[in-house]
Image (tube, rainbow, N blue to C red):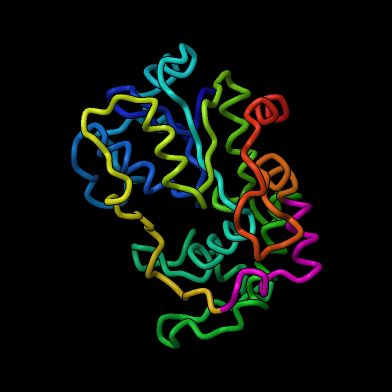
Amino acid sequence: MGFPGTWMTETESMVYRVVPKCACSTIGQIMFFSDHGSFFEGDIHDATTGLHKWAQEQSQPLIEAAVKGRKAPTFTCVRNPYTRILSSFFDKIAGVQRNGQRYRGNLVPMLIQKYGVEVGSPDNDFAFDQIKSFRRFLLFARDTIRWKKPMEPDIHWSAMSGHISTFIVNGGRYDRIFFTERFDEGMQAVLDKVTTAHPIDLKTIPRFNESEGHGPKRAHPVEDYFDDLSMHLMWEIYHRDFQLFRYDFHNPANKMPLSEVDLDEVHAKLG
């Protein structure tokens, strides 16, 4: 099985388990910059050189040796499940992708037909009932995760604990799991443990949000999207994420974690 979703700098200074919708573009660019002194032109997910990735066959033995030999600090980053699923909806469902197409071809038409989701379009300035549509999408996300119907769950809305666990189950161990909401503090703690070819000043690093500007802006506060039923569905899908990563399930308006992640607990429960 190996270590899918794992990236490593070419200098083998740090190892990162990607969790979609959790600052992964910015983290990838920081890793790239730390080796090369410049950012990758374009979306770091498209890079096939300059960064070791498990998806590249030639990188696999190097990543495996680094992870199993504990040669480099290994980390990942998590995000509040409420804001993460909202971000997935606005980016992947309501938004138009960088290539000008809808995400995954027939996914959005199927959601419109089977779940009554509306997404608007660039022609009408993405005017649609965001709250109603999001709640219907959430039902669909639950169906994919719970029953793998009408399709397998997508990486952008499958649980963070699922992504994070594959790394542990296959023999990896995290040195740090930090929060998107406290990004600079968490990323700095990782960088403090490594020697990089090029120094990184997090205050001057841009945020690489590859989904920005391709779709509608969120029109309401986070908590408005989640009624009692939506929160019930959120707990059904993401209870491990709320528990392990210390987010406030009872108050969708509070995006900040309630305490630090207990790494021993994460390894015990996800291993």
**Horizontal side, residue 194 vs residue 64: left or right:** left
**Horizontal side, residue 221 vs residue 187: left or right:** right
Residue at position x 37%, y 48% in the image: 26
Q: Position of residue 64 (x, y in %)?
A: 45, 18
User: The N terminus lies in which quarter of the figure?
Assistant: top right
**Horizontal side, residue 148 vs residue 181: left or right:** right
User: The C terminus lies in which quarter of the figure?
Assistant: top right
Q: Quadrant of residue 52?
A: top left
How would you classify the magenta stretch by its main secondary structure?
helix
Report the label total: 0
Answer above or below: position of 167 versus 231.
above
Task: Reply yes or no: does residue 236 show up in magenta.
Answer: yes
Answer above or below: position of 197 versus 243.
above
Residue at position x 45%, y 32% in the image: 6
The residue lying furthest to the top in this view is: 69
Answer above or below: position of 4 versus 45.
above
Residue at position x 29%, y 50% in the image: 205
Any part of residue 114 in sight? no
Any part of residue 195 in sight? yes
Q: Position of residue 40 (x, y in %)?
A: 24, 45
Residue at position x 72%, y 64% in the image: 139
Q: Position of residue 233 (x, y in %)?
A: 77, 59
> Magenta region: which residues?
220-237
Q: Quadrant of residue 110?
A: bottom right
Nearer to the camera, 1 or 202:
202
Task: Reply yes or no: does residue 150 show up in magenta.
Answer: no
Q: Position of residue 241 (x, y in %)?
A: 68, 45
The residue lying furthest to the bottom in this view is: 124
